Image (tube, rainbow, N blue to C red):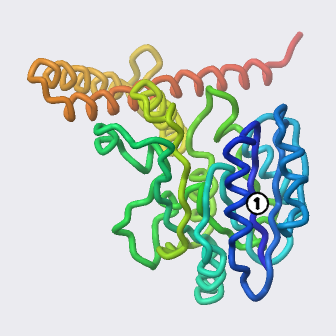
Amino acid sequence: MLTVLLATRNRSRVFTSVLESFCRLRSPSSGWKLLVVDNGSTDQTSQLIASFASRLPLQSVTEPTPGKNFALNAGLAFVEGDLVVLTDDDVFPREDWLIRLRHAADAQPEFSIFGGSVVPHWEIPPPYWIQWADQGAVFAITDPSWRDGPIAPNCIWGPNMAIRSEVFRSDIRFNPSMGPRGSNYLQGGDTELTRRLYQQGHKAWHVREAVVEHFIRKEQMDRGWVMQRAIRHGRGEYRLGHANEITSRKLLLGTPRYLYRKLYNEARDMTKAWLMRKQEDLFRSHWRFNYVRGQIREVRALARERSARTYSATPTS
């Protein structure tokens, strides 16, 4: 048996269609259940979930603390079976999705982490410039050239991932300081977990034919939204991969100097692209510029956290 686990918050409009698509799933021979964590919704989500109770092998729980990873951690206590399949409340799975993941998990016993293909489900036809965006970083869309086989853990993302239940029985949990939590959050909550598992010896496998469609809302096809995504991506990547470098790098105003050089170089490239009216180059350099801005922002956030820890550890007279 396997458990599909997802968190939802105030997405009843699209979640209705998502649950309809779950009703069309073909069940693995070992069975499955759907575990939905309502993360403090104030819309019609609770009534919507209840309306599908007779059509799906459904269990719902609530977690009022805002944050996707808070909700997923709460849901892990109710998981059944040997495989936890994780997805989002704006994802439409293909009918054989669970069968494909089940087969991969059974056929690859030495692997603990599995990821399938994620393709876009556009709410409206996308603008021409969307092709210039990093589809993985912006929309969690996987590269269609990836084949079945071992894959880097940072190539498995929240809309379509599965982890053996035994991993969570050792008290491993999602990091609640990352992932969706209001409008200002660090991107990369799923990647933080898969990288951590990889460091502990767990290996990842890509299942190309296990396909889901990720709903891309019309407001996400706005340049401003995409550039804010670049900042969140930079923040998350810095915390995941560079959090300790401020103790080993030459600093300027408390920030590694190379980040300021990168910011200057991207600003220069943006200016050059604008003057030459190269729209694609301008878009890409603007993305990189905001990515570095996010890294610098996270340096400062880490410094504040260290300062707070130092203050709290200082004995008072």
* Residue type indicated by callout 1: Leu
**Residue farthest top in this picture:** 317
- At label 1, counting other C-alpha atoms closer than 10 Å, the crowd grade (few under 14, some 14-19, many 20 or more) is many
Q: Give x and y (percent) for residue 240.
A: 54, 44
Q: Give x and y (percent) for residue 216.
A: 51, 44
Q: Nearer the viewer, residue 141 or 198?
A: 141
Q: Is residue 5 left or right of residue 88?
A: right
Above or below: residue 85 compared with residue 72: below
Instruction: Give the SS element for disc 1.
Output: strand
- Residue in the picture at 82% in, 41% down: 39
Q: Give x and y (percent) for residue 220.
A: 49, 35
Q: Is residue 228 left or right of residue 76?
A: left
Quadrant location of the N terminus? bottom right
Above or below: residue 199 compared with residue 120: below
- Residue in the picture at 38% in, 29% down: 292
Q: Nearer the viewer, residue 96 or 202?
A: 96
Residue bearing mark 1? 5
- Residue in the picture at 22% in, 23% down: 270
- Residue in the picture at 53% in, 28% down: 298
Residue 244 in sight here: no
Q: Give x and y (percent) for residue 238.
A: 49, 37
Q: Nearer the viewer, residue 312 or 287?
A: 287
Above or below: residue 219 compared with residue 203: above
Quadrant location of the C terminus? top right
